[in-house]
Image: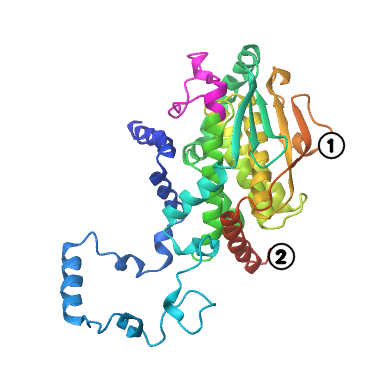
Amino acid sequence: MSYFAGYAGYAGYAGYAGYAGYAGYAGYAGYAGYSGIAPLTDTSASPLGADALLRSREALYVPPSGPAAWQGQWSAPKRWDTDDVANPPAMLPPTEDHANLMRWDMRIRAALLDVELLGQLEFTQPDPETLQLSSRAASGALVKITRPSRSVFEAQLEWVESWSTRREERLGEIVSQQLPQVAHWASLLQLTPQRHRHTLELLETALRFAMLVVMRFKHALCCPRPSEYSPNVQPLIPVPNYSALPSGHATESHMATHLLLALTAQSPGSALAQQLRRLAARISDNRVVAGLHFPVDSAAGQVLGIALATYFTALATQQAATEGWTFIGTEASATPDWNPEAIYGAALPDHLQRDARVLTDPAAAPMLRQLWKLARAEQIDMGFR
């Protein structure tokens, strides 16, 4: 079983602290494969190619004549503005033009989007057991999570151990779902890098956002994992080196679900909506089966994922308000009877509270709006109108 040691790479989530590491998400859909010849434009890894470019330039170079001769080196002088008709090259490109976003390298776009999203947020601790996430441009909390008592975790430990009987049945899912479950979403929506590069980039942005936020909640609430309570748990895969609640997989999968439902304009009762919600619940359950989480971790992650997805979509579509949520862990049942569908009903369980509408700033995320429009156009092309 030594091959499982390779999954210790899950610790790579620490790379979230290094923004350059975001480029690794490009591997989700093989972004380099957009064009078969695209990789050939980069000669930096080949000394021979770099030497060829050096010698070729020396042979081809046409020296300009006169101080402004460079303007005549194009058949039509390059211009970026629409104001100075008499002297086209006199102006530089306009500033703060977010239509330029797609001109930059993917890693740069990722950093810009992260700054735009995270710059809106504020974390506060209204009491020692609670962390609250708010938007600086909003009134009210986007989501507030109070951690459960130790007695709730200890009571659910028996359930974690009983679910271990499902490990053999779900082994393939558990192992393959250690990192974001893009293959599952792509299978349901027929996502391909050739036709949906903007959709995949938007999904990647949402997953980064979710992971950064959930790590802040994990740090603050500091809830031990099942294997820290009992040696009988014996997790199936390596235990991540951070705390349990909220479940990151539950947060990511529910955020992805609600983002994709909004992007494809699905009604709550559609077959696609039902399957995406079931997928998010199954991904969450698999982490309990693997011995990494309590059911209450998944319940908290579901609330956080839905709250983040609703807020993310509101920013992307310039909505003036989003929905706030409160998860009261101290009211969570000691028995793991949480129903993933209960959050969509009118009568919520005791540990959930749907808060008043939270006002947002419709102009707060212009770069995210730009990416959303491109992704939405791809889905319209697929027939999701």
Q: Which mark is residue 385?
A: 2
Q: Magenta segment, which residues?
A: 217-243
Q: For residue 311, what is the image quadrant?
A: top right
Which residue is pictured at 60% across the width and 38% down the height?
Answer: 121
Could you say which is closer to the camera, residue 337 or residue 110? 110
Residues marked 1 and 2 touching at CB (< 8 Å): no
Is 218 a magenta residue?
yes
Find residue 154 and report its horizontal and vertical position in percent: 61, 13
Q: Residues within 10 Å of mark 2 (few under 14, many from 20)?
A: few
Q: What's the amino acid at mark 1?
A: Ala
Is 54 a magenta residue?
no
Q: Specify the principal SS of the magenta part.
A: loop
Q: Secondary structure at mark 1?
A: loop
Q: Earlier in the sequence, mark 1 or mark 2?
A: 1
The residue carrying mark 1 is 346
Image quadrant where one finds the N terminus: top left
Find residue 335 and report its horizontal and vertical position in percent: 70, 19
34 with respect to 373 (left or right):
left
Q: Secondary structure at mark 2?
A: loop
Which residue is pictured at 56% across the width and 51% down the height?
Answer: 203
Find residue 87 and report its horizontal and vertical position in percent: 45, 82
Q: What's the amino acid at mark 2?
A: Arg
Could you say which is closer to the camera, residue 228 or residue 248? 248
